[in-house]
Image: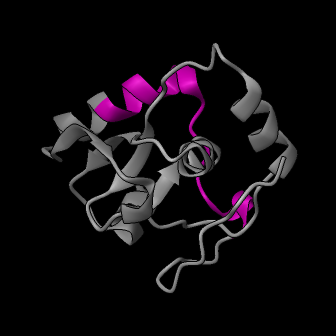
Amino acid sequence: MNVEIPKQHAALSFKRHELPQIASHHMAGFIRSLSRQGVGVTKHHVSPLKLKATQNEFNIEKVRGMMNNRDLPDRPSLTSRDGYILDGHHRWLVDHNKKQSHHTVQVDLPIHDLIKK
């Protein structure tokens, strides 16, 4: 099964280890912390084509496995207000390849500010 990675003129080129990794069991606490700081957080379903990658490394085998998993939980990706993905690149690629909308939690900060949080 081929996995298409969208060509993006505005994508950033961070290596995965250069970005914060938020474990799924810490995501709710991270979002609550942002809200307590007065940062807006909203849930959306968007076309994957409206989002941009921040990292330039992807585990294609992981994406293939996720594409074949019928019981994959609908965990949202964490995105910035300027449309960059901070966490959830592999889920984004699954939805892009399945041509379905993508569940996001959008933080009302530009990506470079969100990375610092």
Q: Does residue 5 appear in this view?
A: yes
Task: Determine if the magenta segment contains residue 28.
Answer: yes
Seen at 61% across and 59% down, the residue is: 19
Q: Main secondary structure of the magenta part?
A: helix
Seen at 66% across and 17% down, the residue is: 70
Looking at the image, residue 68 sits to the left or right of residue 46; the answer is: right
The boundaries of the magenta stretch are: 15-31
Query: Of all residues shown, which one is farthest toward the top?
Result: 71
Residue 80: give x, y in percent of width and height: 33, 58
Residue 76: give x, y in percent of width and height: 43, 34
Looking at the image, residue 79 sits to the left or right of residue 75; the answer is: left
| Residue 33, quarter of picture | top left
Observer-nearest residue: 37 or 80?
80
| Residue 17, quarter of picture | bottom right
Q: Is residue 68 above or below residue 20?
A: above
Residue 94: give x, y in percent of width and height: 62, 43
Seen at 26% across and 40% down, the residue is: 44
Seen at 56% across and 38% down, the residue is: 22
Q: Is residue 34 above or below residue 96?
A: above
